[in-house]
Image (cartoon, grey):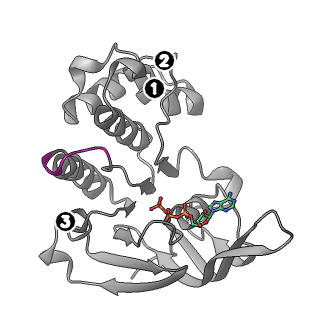
Amino acid sequence: MMGDPLAETHGLCRSFADGNRARLPVLFDINCHIDARDHIALVGVSGSGKTTLLHILGGLDVPTTGTVAWPALGQRETLRPAKVAFVFQRPSLFPALSVVQNVALPVLLLDGRGDAVAAALDLLDQFGLLDLAEKLPEEISGGQAQRVAMARALITKPRLILADEPTGQLDSAGAHHLLDIALYLVGESGAAFVLATHDEAVAARLHIRWSLDAGRLSTDVLPREAHQ
Ligand SMILES: Nc1ncnc2c1ncn2[C@@H]1O[C@H](COP(=O)(O)OP(=O)(O)OP(=O)(O)O)[C@@H](O)[C@H]1O
């Protein structure tokens, strides 16, 4: 039997002030849930609300009306970085820290465990980035930085990973390579994985498809075997 969902929303709406006292509606009446082992592609044209929805599901933003909750994970304040990890669309590595320090950081912040660096090196190795371990973020390419950010998201073995266009700066082979490793690692841990993307070939590898069209969500679940 399926346990409690990791995340769920009911009647979620989000609007932003547009500077003119009017509200700009971005998400309308979103009802969705995420279970363990769900692999979800979140698709939609630019401006359709993908980042806004991911931020709310990650507890980084709150709905204007309606609800979001994490029944299997607990209160919003306790989600990150141990239970929910986020891969941001824009570069998010700390510029003063080396690649390996960036990847180890979430574990160091959590409990200062002595094996954080070893775990970070192991993950970098799996992503084919070991040679870059001692480099600073400014010394690596945008695509390499996206792979480092994905490694950093996975280091705490979170139950839910929310990734905002993590393959946007990679060529097709690089995008599929990143997905190969990420899907292997989330498959091992049983985590759920939500990936916003414009790339149909990337989206087609995930068995659940969420489409946002001008802030409205439709979902489509396909047989898992046909994917990956
Ligand atoms: N903090 C904010 N204040 C005002 N408007 C915002 C804010 N954040 C997002 N928006 C608006 O909400 C809409 C949806 O933005 P969002 O970034 O969620 O779209 P997206 O689907 O992720 O786009 P892209 O694919 O280009 O990243 C856009 O019109 C954007 O301008």
Q: Secondary structure at mark 2?
A: loop
* Sequence-first tag of 3 and 2: 2
Q: Which residue was labeled with disc 2?
A: 97
22, 186: nearer the viewer: 22
- Image height check: is 175 above or below 202? above
Q: In the rendered structure, which amino acid carries the disc numbered 2? A: Leu
Decide if residue 28 is on the left or right side of residue 21. Answer: left
Kind of element beneath mark 1: helix
Magenta stretch contains residue 217: no
Please name the residue shown 42% across and 17% down the image: 98
Majority SS type along the magenta span:
loop
How many angstroms separate mark 3 from mark 2 (CA)?
Answer: 34 Å
Quarter that holds the N terminus: bottom left
Q: Which residue is mark 1?
A: 102
Decide: is 82 above or below 55. Answer: above
CA separation in Å, label 1 and label 2: 6 Å
Q: Nearer the viewer, mark 3 or mark 1?
A: 3
